[in-house]
Amino acid sequence: MIPKHFNIRVYGIVINEQQQLLVSDEFRFGKAFTKFPGGGLEFGEGLKEGLRREFQEEFRLEATVGELFYVNDFLQISAFNTEAQLISFYFYAEIEKETIASVSEKKMPLASEGEQLRWIALSELTPEMLEFPVDKIVAQKLTDNAPSLGKL
């Protein structure tokens, strides 16, 4: 099927001092999945501004968005709308330490619509831990480059 419109997505790659990656466990449309924190860009906002808004709206976190890490350069159809072609931008980001004290290191099952943040050790990260195809590619790139990962 040929997509009919674009869906621009923005995601944050947050790595803490313990070399742990922040992920979002979510339950939407009757399905549980793990992904990078972020979401859809809205009309009238820039990429970094959209990512800051996503962190604020979804998690009540203030994010500092850094350099671009990855953009998918291939056709990727949305898992939720077969008429949408995804263009996904992944940025390094930092969040204030004080605001993330309650983030878990254990996956908790979600029984209803929502999301929950969790830390995964970079040394244990595998692409299979994430649900979506572009996230899997980014996870592989992160594990391939783990010793040289930058921040902002």
Image (spheres, rainbow, N blue to C red):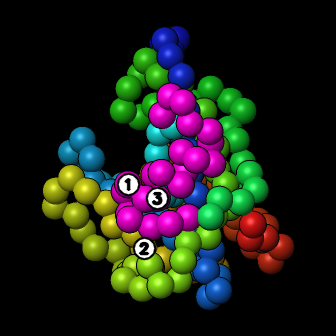
Quick check: 18 above or below 95?
below
Quick check: 147 above or below 101?
above
Residue 111 located within the stretch drawn in magenta: no
- Residue at image mark 3: 55
Image coordinates for residue 47, horizontal then vertical, percent: 62, 42
- In magenta, the rendered stretch is 42-63
- The reply to whether residue 126 is in sight is no
**Spatial CA span between label 3 and label 2:** 14 Å
Earlier along the polypeptide chain: callout 3 or callout 2? 3
Name the one closer to the observer, 32 or 19: 19
Name the residue furthest right.
Answer: 148
Image coordinates for residue 50, horizontal then vertical, percent: 54, 45
Q: Residue at x 21, y 53 (%)?
A: 113
State which mark lies toward you, 3 or 2: 3
Q: Are marks 3 and 1 in contact (CB under 8 Å)?
A: yes
- The numbered mark at residue 57 is 1
Image coordinates for residue 131, horizontal then vertical, percent: 45, 51
Earlier along the polypeptide chain: callout 1 or callout 2? 1
Quick check: 44 above or below 35?
above
Neighbours of disc 1 within 10 Å: few (<14), some (14-19), many (20+): few
Q: Residue at x 62, y 64 (%)?
A: 64
Q: Residue at x 56, y 36 (%)?
A: 45
- Residue at image mark 2: 118
Q: Amino acid at mark 3?
A: Phe
Residue 50 located within the stretch drawn in magenta: yes
Name the one closer to the observer, 35 or 59: 59
